Each structure stands twice: as C-alpha cells, then as structure tokens.
Image (cartoon, grey):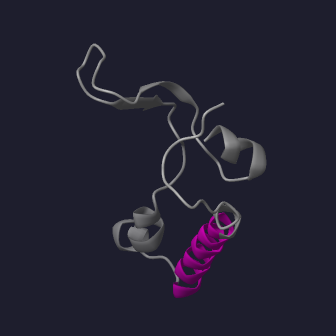
Amino acid sequence: MRLLRCEATIPLPDVLDFSPTSENEIGCPYIIMSFASGTTLYTIWFGHRLNGVISREAVRACRTRALESIASAMVQLGRFLFRTGGRFLF
C-alpha cells in the first residue's frame, strides 16, 4: 500500500497496525486501517431503488462515473506486474 500511495492516485486508507502471523495477542493475522469514507458501489448502482424517484439519466451518469473511476484504478494497477506472490521487503 505504501508503494501504491507513492505511485498511484488511487485513494487508500492508512494502515494503523498489522500482524501477518498468528503470534500476536489475538492469535490470528490482522490489519487495522483508517476508515475510507465514500459511497459503496452497491449504493451507487442500486441506490435509486432505495432513494425514490431519480431520473434514468441521473442513474446512468452515476453508474458511468463509477465505471470510469474503476477503470482508472485498474489502469493504474495494471502497471504493477509481479512474477511471484508475497510481500516487499524494505
């Protein structure tokens, strides 16, 4: 996530703490991150059914904007290709 924060414009939460092993106080791997504010894709895609009357054009515009944001993130992530899995060692 540090690499992505430096090399991409994708919004990311801050990692406050993590443990990749079970050798910790809770006995399992964990990650604690800051809250990422925003609207869920589900709400953007189907919210018009919950919020009442919204024009088809407005629904289409919201969906288009969401898909453009996803495509932008995918293009940025596509620059990072690795032959193996794992983590970076700094």
Q: Position of residue 35 (x, y in %)?
A: 50, 35
Magenta stretch contains residue 69: yes
As drawn, which residue projects farthest toward the front?
83
As rendered, which of 39 and 14 lies closer to the eye? Answer: 14
Q: Quadrant of residue 3?
A: top right
Residue plotted at (51% across, 56% down): 84
Left or right: 4, with 54 as reference point: right
Image: 43 above or below 60:
above
Q: Quadrant of residue 30?
A: top left
As drawn, which residue projects farthest toward the top?
25
Q: Position of residue 6 (x, y in %)?
A: 76, 43
Is residue 16 visible in the rendered image? The answer is: yes
Characterize the magenta stretch by its predominant secondary structure: helix
Q: Indicate the quadrant containing the C terminus: top left, top right, bottom left or bottom right.
A: top right
As drawn, which residue projects farthest toward the left?
27
Residue plotted at (65% across, 68% down): 78
Q: Which residues are magenta?
A: 56-74
Is residue 52 visible in the rendered image? The answer is: no
Image: 12 above or below 20:
below
Image: 6 above or below 62:
above
Q: Indicate the quadrant containing the N terminus: top left, top right, bottom left or bottom right.
A: top right
